[in-house]
Amino acid sequence: MARLALALLLLLAAAFAAAQVPKDPERLASMGYVETRVLEAFFSGRGVPRQDRPERARSAVRAFGTKAPVELILDDAVFVPAARTITSRVIADLEGRTAEPAAAPASAERVRIAVVDREQVNKTLIPVHGDAVALRIDKAAKSVGEQFQIDIIIEGAYWVDPVLDITSQVLLMVEGKPVESARLSAIPQIAAKIGCMDSRRVLSDSRPAVAGKDRLEREFTQRDKALQELRDRAGAESEEFRRGVQQFNDDLRRRRSAELNAVVRASNNVIVHMARSERYDFVLQDAVHCAAKLDMTAAVIGRLDK
């Protein structure tokens, strides 16, 4: 029964997606960035309760996206220049005004970007295939990107036009069914210089990250040894040992967080410097798929290691 429901869902999704294929595949799409905190502060000033602000902000962005000439709106990026930020335009729309778009510099770069709704994919596939399907989802998204020359695939967005949403196609590929080649080939390009960053590699492979791990190991190896000696002397059920374990764990969490945050701050500084000097429009983090030509991770690690 679950498989029949899934098959029907895939057919409906495919039919909807087919209707969204652009008539002019050579047209350029556009994207912008919204500062979530600024938008939620706008609703705070109008007496909207704190718990309702995130959804009000999302609704405002969706309403703006459906009528503005923008196919993709993000609220998560490592770097975005002011000219690509559209928060003031969304607020103007809420107030019934028309705000002139910022004069974003024309980019000669052309990038094809698509979005996968991870939440929808998980809700559709996990009840049928179990949690292990997560790896198949990532593999399917990367395969779609490589086969159809989609430069970047990200998980979710504040607003995405259906023409850039390839969720239905990833579902089809995970199920071993043919994807719609015309639909995927018709994803429009965006005139922007975009880079991708794999934060997990930075936090595991960069010299500052490795040095931080070494510091933690040196610092807590001796403390762990002392704690084991306390257990042998006072007993595992003793109050003194329990307090020692609690203190050890609290200190380890605090120190690990401090080391990670130091690497994140350093890498963000490197990214912002690179993005400004090399005139990037967006730097995105932890994409599902990123073409090698757009991957900045090795360059960021190289600068951190100097």
Image: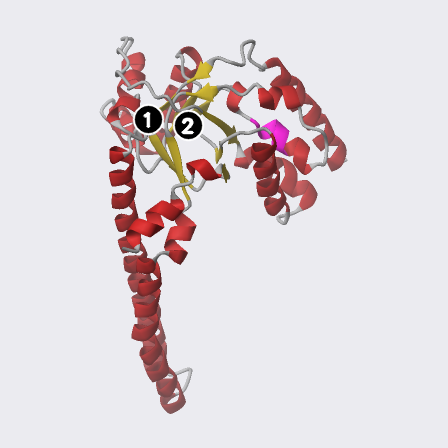
Q: Is residue 140 above or below residue 40?
A: below
Q: Which amino acid does label 1 sit on?
A: Val
Q: How crowded is mark 2: few (under 14 residues within 10 Å), some or many (20 or more)?
A: some
- SS at circle 2: loop
Residue at left offset 33%, top offset 51%: 302
Quadrant of the snapshot with the C terminus: bottom left
The circle drawn on residue 34 is 1
Question: Could one spot residue 46 in this view of the protein?
Answer: yes
* Position in image of residue 286 (x %, y %): 44, 42
* Position in image of residue 177 (x %, y %): 72, 32
Real-space CA distance between mark 1 and mark 2, rounded to the nearest whole angstrom: 8 Å
First in sequence: mark 1 vs mark 2: 1
Q: What residue type is labelled 2?
A: Tyr
Q: Is residue 288 left or right of residue 198?
A: right
Residue at left offset 26%, top offset 19%: 88
The circle drawn on residue 196 is none
Return the residue at label 2: 158
Q: Is residue 202 above or below residue 250?
A: above
